[in-house]
Amino acid sequence: MITRVPAADRKSRVTDRWARVVSDVLSPAAVAVLVLVCYMAQGELTWEEALAGAVCYVITPAVALLGMARRGGAQDIYDPTPGMRQWMLLVGTACYVLGYAVVAGLDLNPGLRWMGLTFSAGAAAVWGIDRFWKISIHSTGVGGGVVLLADISPELWPVWGILPLAAGWARWRRGAHNPLQLAAGTALGAMLAWLLRGYTH
């Protein structure tokens, strides 16, 4: 006997899958990739600089956090237990700080240094706030990324403006955050990126 799934349930499952896809596409690592690609497209980075940025701000944090999630038995890297989340945020912050130190030490492109400061400050701020109130790292990353993207490609503001909304919907749909946590994360990331620009340009 075939059990038919109600249409409403099928639609809900499809929506949930899309929310997962958007969560992946707008994860902090993916946002860093998007920023690097846009910097290259605008001729601001050589491929060597982009590769250095990818190693420092994408590959190293991703490998460290995936390794932690597997060892800690986390079912979902985006929604670990509170204790694991604290450790992952701390390790992510350390990776970004180390990446920034490498980029600054090599005196690479100011945009790469700005990225590093923004990601480091964002991860550290979320780690600190998260000890008392859960705030969205996705939204913080996207908020900072949008400021970086709008600086290099201001003509695409309407496109960049959609990213925080998409990330917020996905994280809300997956039950990870409420609207206030999402809005606070977006504002925090954008504010940090805006404030830190002057230290690298």
Image (cartoon, helix red, strand yellow):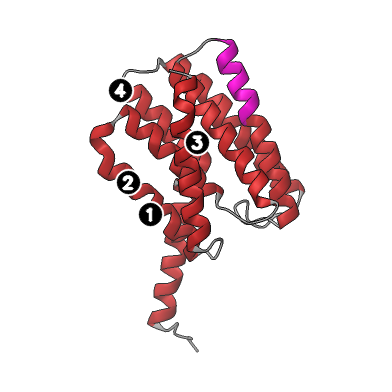
The answer to whether marks 2 and 1 mark residues whose Cβ atoms lie closer than 8 Å is yes
Quadrant for residue 133, please give it: bottom right
| Measured Cα–Cα span from mark 3 to mark 2 | 17 Å
Task: Characterize the local packing of mark 3: few (<14), some (14-19) or many (20 or more) Cα atoms within 10 angstroms.
Answer: many
Residue occupying image coordinates x 47% and y 16%: 49
Is 20 placed above or below 10 here?
A: above
Residue occupying image coordinates x 46% and y 47%: 187
Task: Characterize the local packing of mark 1: few (<14), some (14-19) or many (20 or more) Cα atoms within 10 angstroms.
Answer: some
- Give the labeled residue for mark 3: 192
Point out the frontmost of discs 3 and 4.
3
Q: Nearer the viewer, residue 125 or 59?
A: 125
Q: Which mark is residue 42?
A: 4
| Measured Cα–Cα span from mark 4 to mark 1 | 25 Å
- Give the labeled residue for mark 2: 161
Residue occupying image coordinates x 30% and y 22%: 42
Q: Amino acid at mark 1?
A: Leu
Question: Which residues are drawn in magenta?
Answer: 96-106
| Measured Cα–Cα span from mark 3 to mark 1 | 19 Å
Name the main secondary structure of what is drawn in magenta.
helix
Q: Picture coordinates of residue 14 (x, y %)?
A: 42, 67
